Each structure stands twice: as C-alpha cells, then as structure tokens.
C-alpha cells in the first residue's frame, strides 16, 4: 500500500485500475520521475489534465508520449525511457511547447499567425549580469537581420515606449505564468504575435561567439535567433538542423529551409500564390493559350472568365454536382447545366475563407459530407451548408513540413482513402485511422499515362478522372493507367459548352 501511494504521488495524476499493474509497466519504462512526467506535459506530449482527476495517464499514454518526444527529437521511437531519451529532459532548451494539443472537437484551432504588418519595432529592456544591454541590442539586430528577408520584414529599435517585440532578462517567476527554472534546462521563451515578448532566463550565464557546446555558458545569439522565430509566429520544428528545433544547438549561422518555408507560409502567401499563378499559365505548360488569361483579367477585374475557353484552377465533384473554380469564380454544374446564381465569387459561398486565399486549387468532399479547401499549409473545412466548421494544418494529414502546398486532393471510392497531390508526387492518407499509409509519397508517374502536374482529380460515377489544362483523362484502375481513348476536351464533355470552331484545337488528342 505504501508503495502504491508513493507511485500515485510521483506520477502526479496517474490513475490506473491496478497499482500493481501500473507499477510493473512503469518498471519497464524505468520509472518516469515526476519531473519527467511534468516535462512530457509541459511540452505538449501528454495532454494537460482537464480539471482535477478528470484525466488519467495510463502506462500506454505515457509510453506514447515518450515515443512522440523521441520522434520530435529525432531519436529512435522506442517509447521507453532509455539513457539518450533521459538526456533530453536535462538538455538546455526553449520553454515553448513542442506540440500544441488539439482542442476539443467543437473548438477551432488556435491559428498560427504572423504580424499583419511589415514594419516591426523591438526594444531591449535590460541585459544580464554577463551580457550588457548594448551587446544584447547589437546581437538582436544581427539575429533579426537573418529573418527579415524571408518575410519582407523591417525591424526598428525603440529606446523607450512599447515595442512589438520586447526583450528582457528575468529569473524564476516573472509574472507571465511561465516561471524559469534556475540554471540549465529552460533558457528562454517567447510569445507569438501579437504579444511578441522574448524572455531570457537570467540564471543562465550568457555569452557570445560560442562555437562549441560549453556546458556553463549559453550563446545569446543562437538562442535569440530561435526565440525571434517564435516572436514572428513560428512554432517548433522536428527538423534537427533547423533553427526552430527546440533543443539548444550552437553555432547558429543561418536559417534552414524548414525555417524559411515556415516564414513563407506566414508572410508570403500572396506573393507565392501569384508567382505560381504566373507559372501555371506559362506557355511551356500547354501549347494551347486559353482565351482568357490572368494577364487579361488584370485589366478588368469584373470580367468573368469564359467557362468554355479557359484552363481551370480545379474541378471537383461535390454533392453529386461538378464544381469548377477559375480565378475568384466558381460554377456549379448539374446535368451539364449551370445552377442558378452561378458563376459566383467563391468567397460569397465559402464564408470564412480568408481573403488572401485568392484561388482554389485543391478541394474535396469528405465521407461525412464536409468540404475541405486547401491553401498553403492550411485547410478550411465547411459543412454541407458551406459553413466553416474547422481550420487546420496539413500536419493533420501528416503531410511533411517541407511541402509548402498541395495542388489536388481527392477521395477515392475504390479504397476510401484520401489522395493528396503535390506537383510530382502524392500521399495516401487514411482518414479513418488518421494515419499516412506506408511507402508514401509516391511519384505521380505511378499513374501511368496521366500527365502531371494535374489541375484536378475527381471520382464521377465510379470512375477516376484527371484534368490538366483544357483536357481530361479517365483512369483505368485495373490497368493502372489512363484509358487509351483519352485525353478528351473538358469543356464540351463536362460543361455546357457546344462544340464550336474556335474550340477545335482543344479536341486534338495529342498532349503537347
Ligand atoms: C528586466 O526587465 C524585466 C521586465 O521589466 C524585469 O522583470 C526584470 O526583473 C529585469 N531584469 C533585470 C536583471 O533587471
Ligand atoms: C469510408 O469510410 C467512412 C468512414 O470514414 C465510412 O463511413 C464509409 O462507409 C466508408 N465507405 C466505404 C465505401 O468503405
Ligand atoms: Zn522555442
Ligand atoms: Zn516569460
């Protein structure tokens, strides 16, 4: 009984049906200490208890948490607290969570946002005993300069008043609910916009120009570059070479591609999608120049593209109808007739889709009838009545962080799996289990005789169709290649477009 009590207090709110059972499994895990359990909670690997005794940690959930922590740190995922895993608990690191716990079903995701402006001020309130304020200011300026070009940002130092990013040194409890922990382990933390504060633990010995991992001294510049990432809106990365990796690493000289992609997602969404719009319209892609191009539309924004003479941003089967998207417009087609009220601007239909989403390229209908719109690394999920029910990240579909966006998504009727397509490769996700299937991504060339990148893929009356430019292909699941009579022109066969002389080049059955 004594031992049992001991275990319960050690494991904080650990409740199991049998203390004997839990003890055996904990022995296998080499007994996580209360510090180790609170580490797992603090960084988001174990869910926070929802009120007292509401939540019970089982040996299984602890082992899963250890596995997640190992995955994030790049260690073998054994789920067991071996010595290299235990070292992580002691390592110097940032105090910000690694994993944001998913909120309950009805609550929306807390969105990751950057600053909504390009000119950002910062102010250094004080220095530490080993690093005077003027050195901190100069190192901050250098560290900010590393980030600035990737968001098109400009930083200005203020000497007094309220700045967007306030930098200070503090120790133990310093009034923000996230007390520091004395020397070692947590060395700093920072808050995302619009808060933006950066706090450094004054119980560390701060130094500069440390190339090696010196145990006693912590390199201010290396930590500052990381914390600025948070103050600009980034979260932790499991890419070890990235600046946003949560554990202390020196030296830091430049950003990793993973950090840069994170910045682009936060600050260059519009620029990126415009560049892409330009590149998808390039003549190299298709010898057929659509009659209505993005360049033309620039002159008269109210002009609606001609449905019969254009490429399509995407096409999808939703609610048994064909939805066509081009520029900011959408058409809904049933029995080759345009539904009343269309074309409409898709922003009038998908209320809640942010304005910076100025083109829809990937959209699909889930088994439960919800409709998901993708843009960049985010998605917006709408119910059948087109009401926004959820905002999420591609991480929810297990798409790796280095993928900046998807170009097409469809749900297969054949195996009930979600196919997520980037330009030249695709992933297969099982929504039922919430897991990515093994062996992905695969090359698009696996779908033989289907050209890529594709603009759209959909299931219609049991068949899979791919669309690119003005043409489409039917896929033969048995032969695993496009049916030999394809491609065929999209407009006259799917849309209310009578074949006309001007359309002839679109009938040609030779893909350029
Ligand atoms: C630095 O400023 C912060 C914020 O005003 C304060 O909490 C902290 O005690 C100061 N630290 C030192 C070493 O003076
Ligand atoms: C596909 O999976 C969903 C649950 O995710 C289920 O409701 C549906 O019946 C399944 N359909 C097929 C064809 O297996
Ligand atoms: Zn951090
Ligand atoms: Zn703080």
Image (cartoon, rainbow, N blue to C red):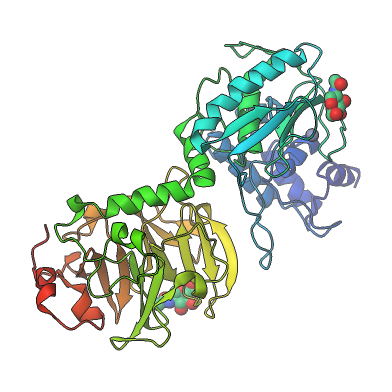
From what the image shows, is residue 276 above or below residue 464?
above
From what the image shows, is residue 179 above or below residue 436?
above
Name the residue: 45% across, 72% down.
Answer: 345
- Residue that protrudes farthest toward the right in the picture: 2
Q: Is residue 401 left or right of residue 93?
A: left
Q: Nearer the viewer, residue 72 or 295?
A: 295
Q: Nearer the viewer, residue 336 or 90?
A: 336
Label total for image: 0
Name the residue: 52% across, 60% down.
Answer: 355
Image position, residue 44 (x, y; %): 68, 45
Q: Nearer the viewer, residue 260 or 26?
A: 260
Q: Is residue 439 visible?
A: no
Name the residue: 87% across, 42% down.
Answer: 6
Q: Is residue 52 left or right of residue 147?
A: right
Image position, residue 281 (x, y; %): 26, 55
Quadrant location of the C terminus?
bottom left
- Residue that protrudes farthest toward the front in the picture: 299
Image position, residue 330 (x, y; %): 39, 73
Image position, residue 165 (x, y; %): 71, 34
From what the image shows, is residue 266 above or below residue 457?
above
Q: Quadrant of ligand 4?
A: top right
Q: Is residue 101 visible?
A: yes
Q: Nearer the viewer, residue 368 or 315?
A: 315
Name the residue: 68% across, 59% down.
Answer: 103
Q: Is residue 507 left or right of residue 100?
A: left
The image quadrant that residue 106 belongs to is bottom right
């Amino acid at each position: 009984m004594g031992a049992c009590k001991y275990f319960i207090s050690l494991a904080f709110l650990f409740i199991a049906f049998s203390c004997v059972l839990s003890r055996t499994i904990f022995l296998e895990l080499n007994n996580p200490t209360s510090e180790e359990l609170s580490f797992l909670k603090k960084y988001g690997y174990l869910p926070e208890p929802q009120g007292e005794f509401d939540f019970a940690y089982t040996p299984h959930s602890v082992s899963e948490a250890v596995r997640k922590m190992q995955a994030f740190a790049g260690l073998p995922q054994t789920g067991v607290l071996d010595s290299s895993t235990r070292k992580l608990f002691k390592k110097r690191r940032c105090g910000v969570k690694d994993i944001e716990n998913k909120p309950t079903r009805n609550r929306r995701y807390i969105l990751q946002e950057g600053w909504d402006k390009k000119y950002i001020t910062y102010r250094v309130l004080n220095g530490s005993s080993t690093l005077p304020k003027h050195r901190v200011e100069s190192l901050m300026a250098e560290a900010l300069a590393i980030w600035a070009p990737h968001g098109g940002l400009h930083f200005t130092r203020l000497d007094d008043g309220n700045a967007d990013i306030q930098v200070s040194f503090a120790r133990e409890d310093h009034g923000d609910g996230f007390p520091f922990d004395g020397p070692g382990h947590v060395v700093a933390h920072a808050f995302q916009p619009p808060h933006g504060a950066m706090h450094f633990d004054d119980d560390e010995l701060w130094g500069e120009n440390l190339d090696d991992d010196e145990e006693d001294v912590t390199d201010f510049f290396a930590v500052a570059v990381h914390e600025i990432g948070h103050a600009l809106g980034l979260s932790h990365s499991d890419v070890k070479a990235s600046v946003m990796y949560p554990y202390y690493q020196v030296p830091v000289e430049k950003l990793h591609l993973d950090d840069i992609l994170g910045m682009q997602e936060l600050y260059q969404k519009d620029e990126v999608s415009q560049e892409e719009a330009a590149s998808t319209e390039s003549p190299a892609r298709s010898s057929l120049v659509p009659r209505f191009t993005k360049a033309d539309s620039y002159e008269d924004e109210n002009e609606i593209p001609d449905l019969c003479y254009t490429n399509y941003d995407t096409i999808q089967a939703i609610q048994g109808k064909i939805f066509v998207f081009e520029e900011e417009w959408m058409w809904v087609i049933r029995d080759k007739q345009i539904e009343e009220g269309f074309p409409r601007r898709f922003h009038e239909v998908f209320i809640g889709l942010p304005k910076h989403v100025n083109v829809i390229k990937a959209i699909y209908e889930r088994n439960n009838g919800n409709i998901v719109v993708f843009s960049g690394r985010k998605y917006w999920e709408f119910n059948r009545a087109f009401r926004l029910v959820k905002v999420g990240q591609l991480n929810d579909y297990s798409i790796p962080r280095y993928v900046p966006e998807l170009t097409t998504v469809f749900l297969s009727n054949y195996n009930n799996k979600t196919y997520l397509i980037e330009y030249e490769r695709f992933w297969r996700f099982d929504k039922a289990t919430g897991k990515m299937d093994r062996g992905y991504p695969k090359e698009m060339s696996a779908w033989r005789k289907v050209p890529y990148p594709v603009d759209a893929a959909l299931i219609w009356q049991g068949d899979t169709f791919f669309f690119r430019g003005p043409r489409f292909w039917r896929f033969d699941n048995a032969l695993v290649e496009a049916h030999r009579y394809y491609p065929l022109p999209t407009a006259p066969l799917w849309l209310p477009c009578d074949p006309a002389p001007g359309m002839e080049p679109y009938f040609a059955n030779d893909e350029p």
